[in-house]
Amino acid sequence: MDNGIRIISEEIPMVRSVSIGVWVDVGSRDETKKKSGISHFIEHMVFKGTPSRNAQQIAASLESLGGHLNAFTSREQTCFYAKILDEHLPDAVNVLSDIMLNSLFDENEIAKEKKVVIEEIHDVEDAPSELIHDIFATTIWKSNSLGYPILGTEETVNSFTRKRLFNYTQANYCPERIIVSACGNLRHSKLLKLVENDFKFRANRGKNGHQRVKSKISCRTCCQQKDIAQVHVSLGLPTMEFNDKRRNALLILNNILGGGMSSRLFQTVREQAGLVYSISSFMDFYVREGIMGVYFATSKGQVERTLELIYKVFNEIRDNCLSDQELYLAKSQLKGNMVLGLENTSNRMNRIARHEVLLGEYLSIDDTMSSIDAVTTEDITNVANQMLNPEVMNIAALGQVEERELIPYE
């Protein structure tokens, strides 16, 4: 649009719903240490009232029509989204624009929401399987804001004032950083008119662009003592950004490593050795970089043996111990998961938005599947040798564990 908002839609006429998301290109990565958690706190606060709707009216605005309204904050984006019957798309656009542009940030609501977010922080602290990922992020991105907790800390949350929230929103919720993504039974031309009518920004709002510095990562370990029954461990390393040509080889490698019960890690560490209840690999992409890792939980005294088996699996793949049949099955799993997930309009809406954020273009499902099919066993071996790099392997552990048990990957 003329004001800089990007609008993307995908028409699916055989459904009766529309999923719509308003993506703001700001997240925890864009915060200072003193403002850690402010993006997430603002995500909460926009639901607490505008001049035309109080908090209860916002909550009921789409629920009363059979739809739902929600939001999430990630390391690089904040997204406000709704799913409604196609006939209620104008209502969804109106509500989303209202909460994003006209939030009051009432002092009393701020005081109450601080308590809510602090309870959310406590929830994570009481859930080792969640907390370990925050510890791992801090370990691997020690000198970069990517490592800040998305929720912030009790100290930073308690420091937020109405003026600080208002100024941060004015600076970052600007047209150039906003993508409106929608999928379902809609017309793009109608969506354009709705957004043009409701998303009207003040002339002095926001600034264009922000700097996201690529992290400098070295090999680190971190042990956090906690009196719990198991030791939770997350280990991993940096990978490439989303537009790298090796992306599909890495996605397949991730599936082979820990993408389900048939994966090498699950079969080796759980089924054969019986050391864990669950083990999985994970990965994500950010601007200018990515991350890949493995998470598991095991009893005290079994961490070292579990790590030895994980490293054994790494080395087998690095040494080209991969059959054509295993590659075929991993590709089929990846494609199947992707296609089945895209039967949901919300997932499709997320997909086209992330393509715009990370690529600046749209990749069709057919093109994506063809590029997955083109990956060879040699491609997997090459990317494994490039990415499973002992020199930048980071390990974080939570529980009754000593750092000497976190054996290095050699």
Image (cartoon, rainbow, N blue to C red):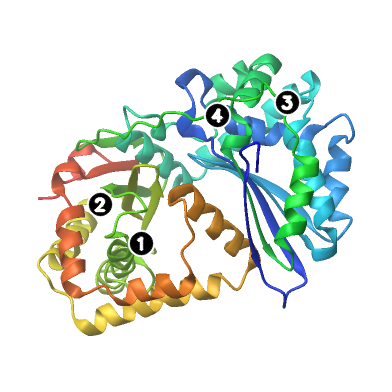
Residue sitting at x 31%, y 41%: 396
Where disc 1 sits, the SS reads strand
Look at label 2 and name its amino acid: Val
Residue sitting at x 55%, y 21%: 156
Residue 243 position in % (x across, y down): 35, 54
Discs 1/2, front:
1
For the N terminus, the image quarter is top right
Q: Residues within 10 Å of mark 1 (few under 14, many from 20)?
A: many
How far is mark 2 from mark 3, CA to CA? 56 Å
How far is mark 3 from mark 4, CA to CA? 26 Å
Q: Is residue 185 left or right of residue 57?
A: left
Look at label 4 and name its amino acid: Gly
How far is mark 1 from mark 4, CA to CA? 29 Å
Look at label 1 and name its amino acid: Ile
Where disc 3 sits, the SS reads loop
Residue 226 appears in the picture as rendered:
no
Disc number placed over residue 37 in the picture, else none: 4
Residue 183 position in % (x across, y down): 66, 63
Which callout, 1 or 3, points at the residue further toward the start of the chain?
A: 3
How far is mark 1 from mark 2, CA to CA? 13 Å
Q: Camera-side residue: 207 or 189? A: 189
* Mark 1 vs 2: CB contact within 8 A: no
Look at label 3 and name its amino acid: Arg
How far is mark 1 from mark 3, CA to CA? 50 Å
**Residue at which label 2 appears:** 303
**Residue at which label 3 appears:** 202
Discs 3/4, front:
3
- Number of numbered discs: 4
**Residue at which label 1 appears:** 279
Which callout, 2 or 3, points at the residue further toward the start of the chain?
A: 3
